[in-house]
Image (cartoon, helix red, strand yellow):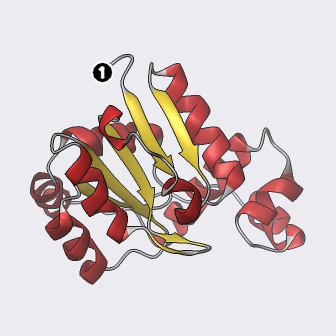
Amino acid sequence: MSGDKLFYIEDDEVLALVTVRALQKRGYEVDHFISLEQALTCTDLAKFGYALLDLKLGDGISLPLIKELIDANTAMKIVVLTGYASIATAVQAVKMGASNYLAKPATIDDILRAFEEHAKESLCMADSEPDEMSLRRREWETIQAALAANNGNVSATARQLKMHRRTLQRKLQKKPVSD
């Protein structure tokens, strides 16, 4: 997949910066857009082989963009990434042509795997996993990933997670929970 062009729309600047860097390290050429308005100014959608779309943006939702991307390049693999996951939007995204749908937080490996798996296959795999991560463990993993993305900066991590800094510090003082 080295050298592939990726269309990326994400309005969270910190998350976008970390994601773009990670994708570039893996050989992707990434064009990042911070809004639907900015994304719609892209005139050459056919050059992209992949698209990563944040579902909810400051100026709307990205689902209508799926049709435009597919019209430009029918072979494009599209993954919708959202912090507001629901079965309804997942089904709608896949029906519109998205290859897959992921809930935030997702690692770069999760995203790349989603490009390669078809949504139905990944849903079947998720159903067959016997041990689902506990909510407390998932929270811990999310905090740790955000902290790493912010180079250990607790204040920046708290802002990214929309959490009070002291609350985050208390959570960090606790030992990690097991599954």
Q: Amino acid at mark 1?
A: Met
Which residue lies at the image location 48% right of the left edge and 58% below the top edge? 40
Q: Residue 117: x percent and y percent? A: 17, 44
Neighbours of disc 1 within 10 Å: few (<14), some (14-19), many (20+)? few
Looking at the rendering, which quadrant does residue 6 occupy? top left
Q: Residue 53: x percent and y percent? A: 42, 56
Of 73 and 131, which appears nearest the observer?
A: 73
Q: Which residue is mark 1?
A: 1
Quarter occupied by the C terminus = bottom left
Left or right: where does residue 143 sit relative to residue 111? right
Looking at the rendering, which quadrant does residue 65 occupy? bottom left
Of 63 and 166, which appears nearest the observer?
A: 63
Which residue lies at the image location 25% right of the left edge and 62% below the top edge? 67
Which residue lies at the image location 44% right of the left edge and 44% below the top edge? 43
Quarter occupied by the N terminus = top left
- In this picture, is 2 found above or below 134? above
Of 43 and 140, which appears nearest the observer?
A: 43
Q: Secondary structure at mark 1?
A: loop
Left or right: where does residue 70 sit relative to residue 3? left
